[in-house]
Amino acid sequence: MKQTIYLRADRRGVIGMTKGLPSLYKDEIIIKVNVEVADKVFGNPVIEQKVVVQDWASDIDVQDVQMHQNIITQEEAEMIREKRLERMREILENQGYTITKEEETDGGV
């Protein structure tokens, strides 16, 4: 079984679920969820899955990004983020700055 559902949510929680794109009130968001369930899993026990929605625009300035659709995938968000970071690097380098990336550490001493 494959199906797309839309969760309507605000800061208090999920308000509802629809199979079509819902209308929104102020401060609500839509979360598009593609659900795929294998035939073999129907029955007991109850299956639990976790859905985490991250801020797709974190660490980028989206003032100049033109959104032509109301839905964005995680892959598209990452692509926009990477393009914006690359453009910021270019701007800073053109102004004489040297850009380096911090090395990630495992938290050890």
Image (cartoon, rainbow, N blue to C red):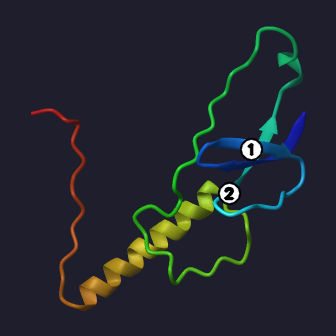
Q: Is residue 40 left or right of residue 106?
A: right
Residue 49: x percent and y percent? 67, 27
Callout 1: helix, strand or loop?
A: strand
Quarter of the image where the N terminus is located: top right
Tag 2: residue type? Glu
Residue at the image point whose x is 74% and y is 61% from the top: 25
Residue at the image point whose x is 53% and y is 50% from the top: 54
Callout 2: helix, strand or loop?
A: loop
The front one of 28 and 91 is: 28
Q: Which residue is most to the bottom?
A: 95
Residue at the image point whose x is 68% and y is 22% from the top: 48
Residue 9: x percent and y percent? 69, 48
Task: Give the answer, above or below, for where 69 lies relative to 33.
Answer: below
Task: Give the answer, above or below, for where 47 lies relative to 107.
Answer: above
Report the residue marked by disc 2: 28
Report the residue marked by disc 1: 15
Write down the quadrant of residue 105 in the picture: top left
Residue at the image point whose x is 50% and y is 64% from the top: 57
Q: Which residue is most to the left?
A: 109
Residue 51: x percent and y percent? 63, 37
Tag 1: residue type? Ile
As measured in the structure, the alpha-carbon distance from the residue carrying label 1 to the one carrying label 2 is: 9 Å
The front one of 102 and 55 is: 55
Quarter of the image where the C terminus is located: top left
Q: Mark 1 and 2 residues: CB-CB less than 8 Å, in contact?
A: yes
Residue 68: x percent and y percent? 71, 78
